Amino acid sequence: MNYEWSLDALYKGYDDPKFAEDMKKLDESIARTNRFAEEISSLPPKEALLEYIRQGEEDELLISRLYSYASLRSSANTKDTESASVIGRLMGKLSSTAKAGTKIDRYIASIENLDELIESDPILKEYEFMLKNLRDAQKHRLSDECEEIAALYDISGGSAWSDLHSYLTSSVTADYRGEKLNLSSVRNLAYSPDPAVRKDAYEAELACYEKIKDSVAFALNSIKLQVINGARLRGFGSPLEQVLFRSHMTRETLDALLEAMKEHMNIFHRYLRIKAEALGHKNGLPWYDLFAPMGSCERRFTPETAKDYLLNIFGGFDKDLAAMVERAFDESWIDFYPREGKVGGAFCASLNGINESRVLTNFDGALTDVVTLAHELGHAFHNLNLEKHRPLNNDYSMPVAETASTFNENVVMSAAIKAAQTDDEKLFLIESRLQDTAQIICDIYSRYLFETAVFENRENEFLPAEKLCELMLEAQKTAYGDGLDHSVLHPYMWLCKGHYYSSGLSFYNFPYAFGGMFARGLYEKYLKYGADFVPVYRKLLYTTPIATVEGAAKVADIDLTDKAFWTESLMSYKAEVDEFERLVAKK
């Protein structure tokens, strides 16, 4: 087994003749796209549509191949300057088609009998969802000139403010026990088994924000005002309305999810209170102990034993999933170990056109690393279920993006908990899952409340750092209830979370709660119906790029606008909190 991934399925290197040939094809494709933009209005509409799809499919496979290779090489080695150069060249080349792409999209959206033409041709019918979304999106586009101006101004506006936030948070240092630590290092101490370390790190973290709070507050205010104005200019009633439109999700679904969360948040408040008492706190859990470890898991894994472990679990769920996991390990889809120059974290990248994926992790042998592998291989399984789609039908919206990955986590964690060898290991696993779930329920809800409040206030007033802290504390008190000690919260969560600092992506919070609860609800259906549910689940994954969020869920006979579905998902955690309480009482 290789411990680093192989990209040979794309290219053998930058000196591979195939790479040079594809770069030449890209130049030809760009020229062809620009010519097509000039000619499209003179073509019969149906002919124009079919040519648009033919060119689009060819370009998608070509661009995906080139960009994936350079991007994956860069992720595996950030010191690979050749890859950074190639990425820059690719982005420069592709930007030269922006005007042409806008012109083509605008023409297609203007076709009066688009619905009729879609019904008249099998290829167009396969792209019905994409074509109709393109038409609907044009209703919210500015003129070509205004779109170009907005993009140019964003470089020195929202994008620049976002860069400022990244710079300040990556360069600020915290004074921790006589040492200077960067923000990431001091925040990671929240997971220390030593309570004194956790508390000192929390205090050092909060103190370091004082150095940059005013500058970051200016960044946040500027970005959010730009988003408010941009949404209004495009005909949206609010930034949230714009986000839901782009997510192919209705407000009714979001409201049903949030109402269910509010009604059953007490399940997770109870978990937090139990943890607080176990750690010696009487008034709820102080923020610095949110991630305090409990129990222990001594099991260690190698990539080989991780493979056997996952195959044993997934083999009982779906043979195609198990076969794909085996391929991933045997055919060098996975880059396992951390090393100098390799990016942190984990991700999965689809290699469109060859029906493969590549997974990056920073594996160190813990059971949690095996769960991370399962999560990323869930994304690969989602990709596997899209392979019968045409090339342009491979993109799904943010709320459903974590469906298969989180479903895999549920399968593996449930198996691990069931097979726990000691009470201490079982406590570790259950607390780990409850801790993660409390984050996507309580913490995500607090972030949603905070961002909503910022948008509501920013239109009429500038929000200084003190006001932003006040809004964040209010949101945390509402979301965490009596689960946390209200005198020891985190007023600067607005500053350390990069999700707020994007002019192109707002409310990067509720999709986490959606994904977690949607996957949990699907897992509960699997427990109820067993093997009969697996084909339904796979069809749902297949449907995600060609339907709304609600339409994909209908495949599994789920009405996302009905609070009952979300309630069932949330209530499934009650028994785990009961078991957590039992295990804590035994210690």
Image (cartoon, rainbow, N blue to C red):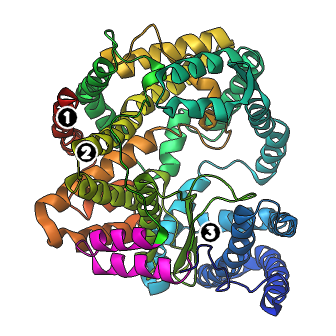
Q: Which residue is mark 2?
A: 426
Give the residue drawn at x 64%, y 25%.
495
- Tell me the kind of residue under disc 2: Lys
Residue 359 is at least partly visible in this image: yes
Q: Residues within 10 Å of mark 1 (few under 14, many from 20)?
A: some
Q: Main secondary structure of the magenta part?
A: helix
- Tell me the kind of residue under disc 3: Ile
For marks 3 and 2, the one nearer the N-term is 3
Name the residue nearer the viewer: 80 or 242.
Answer: 80
Are the residues tagged 2 and 1 within 8 Å (C-beta)? yes
Give coordinates of residue 208: x percent, y percent: 70, 19
Name the residue nearer the viewer: 561 or 345.
Answer: 345
For marks 1 and 3, the one nearer the N-term is 3
Describe the element under mark 1 as helix, strand or loop.
helix
Give the residue drawn at x 59%, y 22%.
201
For marks 2 and 1, the one nearer the N-term is 2
Q: Which residue is mark 3?
A: 108
Q: Is residue 574 magenta?
A: no
Q: Which mark is residue 583?
A: 1
Is 296 placed above or below 477 here? below
Give the residue drawn at x 49%, y 52%.
398
Callout in the foreground (3, 2): 2
Is 260 on the left-hand or right-hand side of 229?
left
Describe the element under mark 3 as helix, strand or loop.
helix
Q: Find the magenta span and give its range.
A: 304-333
The quarter of the picture where the C terminus appears is top left
